[in-house]
Image (tube, rainbow, N blue to C red):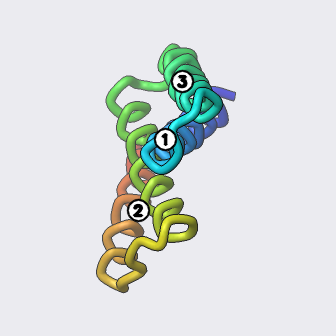
Amino acid sequence: MAWFTLILAGLMETFGVAMINQLSIKRNWQTAALLILGFGLSLALLSYSLQFIPMGTGYAIWTGIGVVGGALVGMLFYGESKDWKRLLFIFMVLGAAIGLKLVS
């Protein structure tokens, strides 16, 4: 359950980052509220999961999901570069997060 919560926390961080970008495009209270909700849920879920997962591992996985998720959202929805080198480094971050889980 803690790992599921941690993954959900990382996805909420990705959502919050997407809302930051959306807020820079279109300023309105709904987007600001979604940004606050996304990051608030992310931190609450991270806090819960760290009660069961070592802090170093949990934080690294959470930030890794946020980094990979933010990059993928940028590529899919905001026209950011899909260069093979960028994809390689995204997979390296993902591989490092999986490696941390395997050795924890």
Q: Residue furthest right?
A: 1
In this picture, is 18 found above or below 29? Answer: below
Q: CA–CA distance between discs 3 and 1?
A: 11 Å
Q: Earlier in the sequence, mark 1 or mark 2?
A: 1
10 Å neighbourhood of mark 3: few (<14), some, or many (≥20)? some
Please name the amino acid that badge 1 sits on: Leu
Taking the spot 42% from the left edge, 80% from the top edge, the residue there is: 82
- Quick check: 29 left or right of 62? right
Q: Which SS class for mark 2?
A: helix
* In front: label 3 or label 2: 3
**Residue occupied by mark 2:** 95
Please name the amino acid that badge 2 sits on: Gly
Q: Quadrant of the C terminus?
A: top left
In this picture, is 52 found above or below 86? Answer: above
* In front: label 3 or label 1: 1
Q: Nearer the viewer, residue 30 or 3?
A: 30
**Residue occupied by mark 3:** 36
Question: What percent of the width, then of the height, locates residue 61?
Answer: 43, 42
Q: Which SS class for mark 3?
A: helix
Q: CA–CA distance between discs 1 and 2?
A: 31 Å
Q: Nearer the viewer, residue 46 or 102?
A: 46
- Quick check: 103 left or right of 4? left
User: Which label belongs to residue 23?
Assistant: 1
Residue 87 position by quadrant:
bottom left
